[in-house]
Amino acid sequence: MLPYVHQVTKYDPADRDEHGHSAGTEPATSDHGPVEAAYLQAVAAFAEESGVDRLAIREPQIGGFIHFGLEPPVDGHGLAGLFPAGLAGFHDGALVPIAVGLELVRAMLRDNGAWCRLEVDGEFTVHVGWDQYLYVGSSRPCEAALNRTRALGLFPERLNASPYDFAPDDPGYVQRPADADFWARLNWTVNAHRATFLEEVFALGASRWHRLTRHNIETVRSQLTPRSQLAVWPDLLTDVDTALAALPDEGLVEIVWEDADGRITSTVVDETQFEAVTSQLAGASSAGVVSMLAGEDLPLFTAVLPDSDGVLRARWQTEPTPSDRDWAFLKTLRRGQVVTGTVTSIAGFGVTFVDIGGFTAMINIPELSWRPFDHPSDVVSVGQEITAEVLDVDMVWERVPLSLRAMQEDPWPQVAQRIGQVVTGTVTKIVPFGVFVRIEEREDGFQGMVHTSELDASDVIKVGDALTVKIIDVDLARRRIALSHVQASDASTQGHPHA
């Protein structure tokens, strides 16, 4: 926050009523003449005394979002000729000389339909508010600029802060950057859906739409406007008549259409403009309607372009989608972290799903227990609260595998110490190459295998039979136990415990 902030207006404080409103005769619109020129000269004086010769555009907006209707709309929103690259030059972070900055102030004073904050980080700010209220902040007292402002017939008043200082809609929400993980996720989405649309918002109320294929993603990426907000949409441009049937009775919507040449156009309109815009869609090959109401028609996921050094400096926030919320949650997780969750379901193929703070993680069968079991329901049950370890955090696939057995003591080293023991266990399974025998007296006891070469061809062995065996090897890497069959006569000489 800058230490010196002044409200600059053409309204004499002596003319204010008991509520602080101006009761004078000054109109709430620009005179397009000497008073407007005085405002611009005052801004120039403050900038010069602050040592500022360039200004950064922050949070630009154009169109119906900020046109108050006090003056007739102007083609180009008052920006015509200011940016060599066209309207896309009016983007967050764009640096402009003072002369262009003053023209932007003029456009805002005239309510031409363009608005932004003009700032130099830590040094200077210019904010234009309603009814010709101007707010100038500086890191310096600017006494000469204040005197110049008064001499121009304007009234500067000291404030603690500008009412137009940036404040995030949700201070706790972190905007997703369009980093390597984002582009990997986007590539996966395009390949999975075959057709996906990328909406590039370079100023609030101004966007470009791109149809993405796996072949053109990098080309589109290289042409995006700096610090743009990006929204990934499914292939929402379908049959034109079906798409237009989604128009609401009232409210702001964005209508998007594609012509036969593949050119994509979009415009934000309300119910008074529906008929005029839909008449333009006669030759469209496809179209779509996106509601501008909060919570409706959310994209698949969103992001904001970082600067070329990878730092995300754009301050605006998009409305978070479910995928964005998942991303934000995943950013809080680390491999090896211990989490608590509730078992929500056990899939038919055995994967167990666990809710960990609103995100669904999963436990694959081998990670449920060190010990053998027939079905995951032998280890966990739906509704059960468990504590597990995070094995990985996949930001592209948005997956988090967990391990329940990582929270248990590994019993295999103890099993390895039993090599040479003779035990009598229960036959649990017979396979062509041998039989499996449980070597512990518990339902989830470890099992080893007696190879057919260890068995007498005359032996008739059935599941459930008791079989005396010797533990001859424990492979800790592959978690396998090798057994040999011990004949009754040999067992009597060696002695053995029960399984």
Image (cartoon, rainbow, N blue to C red):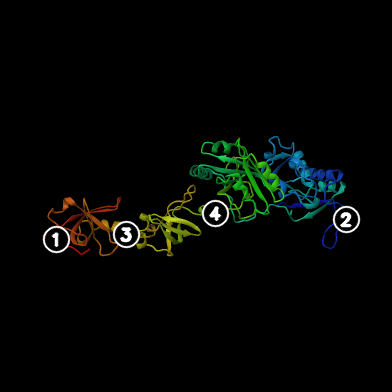
Q: Nearer the viewer, mark 1 or mark 3?
A: 3
Q: Nearer the viewer, mark 4 or mark 1?
A: 4
Say if mark 2 contacts mark 4, CB within 8 Å.
no
Q: Dot 2, how many residues are within 10 Å of its Cα: few (below 14), some (14-19), or many (20+)?
A: few
Residue 13 in percent (x, y) is at 85, 56
The disc, 4 or 1, on the residue closer to the chain's N-terminal end is 4
Q: Is residue 358 left or right of residue 377?
A: right
Residue 453 in percent (x, y) is at 16, 50
Name the element at disc 4.
Answer: helix
Q: Looking at numbered disc 3 in the image, what kind of residue is underneath it?
A: Asp
Q: Is residue 180 above or below residue 392?
A: above
The disc, 3 or 4, on the residue closer to the chain's N-terminal end is 4
* Rendering quarter of residue 44: top right
Residue 491's label in the rendered image is: 1
Q: Looking at numbered disc 2 in the image, what kind of residue is underneath it?
A: Gly
User: Label 1 to label 3, Cα distance in Å?
Assistant: 31 Å
The disc, 1 or 3, on the residue closer to the chain's N-terminal end is 3
Say if mark 3 contacts mark 4, CB within 8 Å.
no
For mark 2, what is the residue? 24
User: Label 3 to label 4, Cα distance in Å?
Assistant: 35 Å
For mark 4, what is the residue? 322
The disc, 1 or 2, on the residue closer to the chain's N-terminal end is 2
User: Label 1 to label 2, Cα distance in Å?
Assistant: 112 Å
The disc, 2 or 4, on the residue closer to the chain's N-terminal end is 2
Q: Looking at numbered disc 1 in the image, what kind of residue is underneath it?
A: Ala
* Camera sees residue 404: yes
Name the element at disc 2.
Answer: loop
The disc, 3 or 2, on the residue closer to the chain's N-terminal end is 2
User: Label 4 to label 1, Cα distance in Å?
Assistant: 64 Å
Q: Nearer the viewer, mark 2 or mark 4?
A: 4
